[in-house]
Amino acid sequence: MKVALISCGRSDYSIYLPLIKKLKADPFFNLDIIAFGTHVSQFYERTVNMFYKDGFDVAYELESLVLGDSPEAISSAMGLTTIKFSSIWALEDYDMIIVLGDRYEMFSAIVASVPFNIPVAHLHGGETTEGAFDDMFRHSITAMSKLHFVSTTGHAKRVGQIIGKNEHIYHVGAPALDNLYDLELLSIEKFKEVWNIDLSKPTVLVTYHPETVASNKNVEYVRELCKAMARLDKQFVITMPNNDTMGTVIRTELLNFIGDNTEKYKVVEVLGAIGYYSCMKNCDFLLGNTSSGIIEAASFNRYVINIGDRQKGRESGANVIHVPAESNIIVETANNISSLPPYTDGNIYGNGDTCSKILTIMKDYHKNELEGKK
């Protein structure tokens, strides 16, 4: 079965990683990885190298990113991505395309595949993030897909509403959670050796992305986050935002706030899957508005302070505390976390067997398709 897996940036790499490992290890599949977007940009440190570092070949590196994060730049990048992928879909004879989530880059690549009638397998469909315009891209990808691998029963129901039927909708859980069983995480000592960050100190893992729906509020929101961090007696490990509208503004505000105070604030562009999960495992709690707080943190029994509306609408466990982008409330919530009982209620997104389920379903689908053509 010839399969194309498309990856547009560091944010999807750790989610894809366990699935790529299983696809590569199974002789039933012939996998091509196609990297594009921020993955191949020098400005974003060419995160496509994460594939090569982990021993995976990349069939295509597509330069489709227009420098800048203005609406015009993003719209132009969407058009360029569609054009470039049309050439690949015309050249290759894929049995299936695997696509993750909700990025505008992913949408553009899948739009290009529609005239070629290539079946699409969509991961993480049916979810909602009211604070980002990603919903329209995610739901559009759902409408263009053949197989739907969803993370919860609630998300399965929403996919059924979008496509108007319940055929080929599979509740398999979140692929990223398989990492927790496949990856050997770093000890506190090893993490310090690699990143020069001491996680034995009280540490907060921070990832904050712009709200692309209320983009005019982003400066105000990130400044409230900075005010809160300034008032908390913690070490902060801060990863930088994605290439969304206003992403550069968030990045600039954070770096200007941190200045030379690199003792308290540890900025890392890309931790990678092992580094990120190792930090998550050893931090006091997560702060920001990233999907990893909603999906993965519960598996480490970590509480999450989720700021604002970017993740609003996505199902979350009892470990996630939703707060507005107001520094006083963020500080009060952070101070109260130490008094909460340890979180032990499990993870609504699964238990680490997602990718095996996906491979079985893909095999059955392909075999049935071949049988139907006889």
Image (cartoon, rainbow, N blue to C red):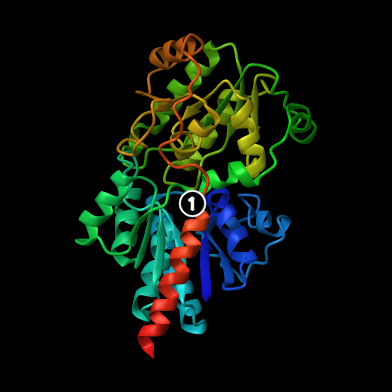
Q: Residues within 10 Å of mark 1 (few under 14, many from 20)?
A: many
Name which quarter of the figure residue 51 lies in. Answer: bottom right
Q: Residue at x 44, y 33 (%)?
A: 289
Q: Is residue 289 above or below residue 49?
A: above
Name which quarter of the figure residue 138 lies in. Answer: bottom left
Q: Is residue 266 above or below residue 145?
A: above
Please give the residue where the numbered disc 1 appears in the rendered image.
354
Q: Residue at x 31, y 44 (%)?
A: 128
The kind of secondary structure element at disc 1 is helix
Camera-side residue of 368 and 239: 368
Q: Residue at x 44, y 77 (%)?
A: 367
The answer to whether residue 336 is left or right of residue 198 is left
Camera-side residue of 314 and 59: 314
> Residue lying farthest right?
193
Expressed as whole percent of the image width and height from the top left, the position of residue 7 reads: 53, 59
Expressed as whole percent of the image width and height from the top left, the position of residue 327 reads: 42, 16
Camera-side residue of 29 and 239: 29
Expressed as whole percent of the image width and height from the top left, the position of residue 223 reads: 45, 24
User: Which image quarter is the C terminus in?
Assistant: bottom left
The answer to whether residue 196 is left or right of residue 30 is right
Q: Is residue 12 above or below residue 112?
A: above
The answer to whether residue 5 is left or right of residue 50 is left
Residue type at the position of mark 1: Thr
Camera-side residue of 311 and 178: 178
Res 268 seen here: no
Res 218 seen here: yes
Expressed as whole percent of the image width and height from the top left, the position of residue 221 reads: 40, 27
